[in-house]
Image (tube, helix red, strand yellow):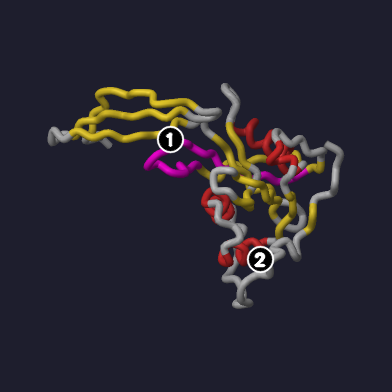
């Protein structure tokens, strides 16, 4: 589809650890000009890792939202790294599981109004337990659990899982069967009924 906007210039406003803030200057077909700020992103993957009892999840602190967030394994692509290689690496680093098989689930953009991040989604099966290799302090201090499908849906409907990428990937993988039973709000300890990952030396 032909765009009704023409990019006439881009100015770099600043740089961070992973992102660059840029301002695009555009002109519409009707002559109106506009400015739009955007964050550039190297690209990422997210992985639905299916174990014998459910989906492997990680609960880690996210400074951007000042809170602990439940997520599936996910992370940035290294320069020149294939998405499948990133998916394999993130499963090992975050939940200590090496996928025997990886299947593509699709691709999404997380926040196209301000961010050019593109995320490749994968389904990981035939998992083999390996030592976790946390890439940073957030991952090292994270909780890792295997969550049954019925509990996953209840956590989403209760608001315990709010990561949009995680919810979309779980839906594409078919990991939320049927409506959750009307049991009211979950207890404060949402990890009840899930199996903890074996403790391993880092």
Question: In the rendered image of this protein, does residue 39 appear above or below residue 169?
Answer: above
The residue labelled by disc 2 is 150
* Direction from residue 142 to residue 156 in the image, left or right: left
* Direction from residue 116 to residue 187 in the image, left or right: right
Magenta segment boundaries in residue numbering: 107-127
Name the disc covering residue 116, or none: 1
- Front one among 50 and 89: 89
**SS under mark 2:** helix
Q: Which of the 4 image quarters holds residue 148? A: bottom right
Nearest to the eye among marks 1 and 2: give it. 1
Q: Residue at x 68, y 41 (%)?
A: 138
- Front one among 179 and 113: 113
Q: Residue at x 55, y 52 (%)?
A: 163
Q: Position of residue 172 (x, y in %)?
A: 54, 52
Q: Is residue 123 magenta?
A: yes
Q: Residue at x 55, y 35 (%)?
A: 44
* Direction from residue 110 to residue 50 in the image, left or right: right
């Amino acid at each position: 589809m032909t765009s009704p906007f023409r990019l006439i210039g881009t100015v770099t406003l600043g740089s961070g650890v992973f992102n660059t803030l840029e301002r695009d200057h555009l002109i519409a077909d009707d002559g109106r000009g506009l400015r739009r700020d955007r964050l550039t992103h190297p690209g990422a993957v997210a992985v639905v890792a299916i174990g014998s009892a459910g989906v492997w999840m990680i609960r880690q602190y996210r400074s951007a939202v000042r809170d602990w967030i439940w997520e599936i394994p996910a992370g940035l692509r290294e320069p020149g790294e294939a998405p499948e290689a990133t998916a394999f690496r993130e499963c090992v680093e975050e939940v200590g599981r090496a996928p025997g098989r990886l299947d593509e689930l699709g691709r999404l953009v997380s926040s196209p109004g301000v961010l050019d991040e593109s995320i490749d989604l994968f389904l990981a099966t035939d998992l083999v337990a390996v030592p976790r290799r946390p890439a940073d302090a957030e991952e090292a201090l994270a909780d890792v659990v295997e969550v049954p499908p019925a509990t996953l849906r209840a956590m989403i409907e209760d608001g315990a899982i709010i990561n949009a990428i995680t919810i979309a990937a779980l839906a594409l993988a078919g990991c939320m069967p049927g409506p959750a039973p009307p049991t009211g709000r979950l207890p404060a300890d949402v990890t009840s009924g899930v199996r903890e990952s074996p403790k391993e030396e880092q």
